[in-house]
Amino acid sequence: WGVQKPDARFFAQIVQACGAPPAALTYVGDRVDNDVLPALAAGMRAAFLPRGLWAGVGVSPVAALPGLLALAQPRESMPD
């Protein structure tokens, strides 16, 4: 694509490739600065997967579970 994260154009390419509105997409990443914040800025939902350098960031996997389960629920706005 000629661009890399966290460039906004990278996330715009994802939206275009998926053919869905940004609000219908959830971007999963393991970096807050490179994944989560730019995805949110692009209008997507974002799920933070704490691992590697970010493993110690104060998010308990158990505390995050309800949010992840909610993402797995079917949404009316999702394309077929």
Image (cartoon, helix red, strand yellow):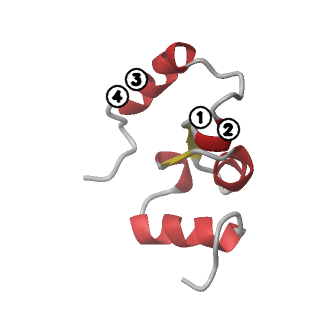
Q: Residues within 10 Å of mark 2 (few under 14, many from 20)?
A: some
Instruction: Determine the secondary structure under disc 2.
Output: helix
Mark 3 / mark 2, whichever is N-terminal: 2
Q: Are marks 1 and 2 in contact (CB under 8 Å)?
A: yes
> Cα distance, mark 1 to mark 3?
16 Å
Tag nearer the camera, 1 or 4: 1
* Front of the two marks 1 and 3: 1
Extreme bottom residue here?
A: 2
Question: Is disc 4 in contact with disc 3, using a CB cutoff of under 8 Å?
Answer: yes
**Label 1 residue SS:** loop
* Position of the N terminus by quadrant: bottom right
Residue 50 or residue 8, whichever sits in front = 50
Residue drawn at x 67%, y 47% is 40
Q: Earlier in the sequence, mark 2 or mark 4?
A: 2
Q: Amino acid at mark 4?
A: Gln
> CA gap, disc 1 to disc 4?
22 Å
Q: Which residue is mark 1?
A: 50
Residue found 61% across the figure and 71% down from its top: 10
State how far apart marks 1 and 2 are (Cα): 5 Å
Q: Is residue 9 above or below residue 48?
A: below
Q: Which residue is under mark 3?
A: 69
Q: Give coordinates of residue 16: x percent, y percent.
A: 49, 71
In this figure, which residue is indicated by the disc labeled 2? 54
The residue tagged with tag 4: helix, strand or loop? Answer: loop
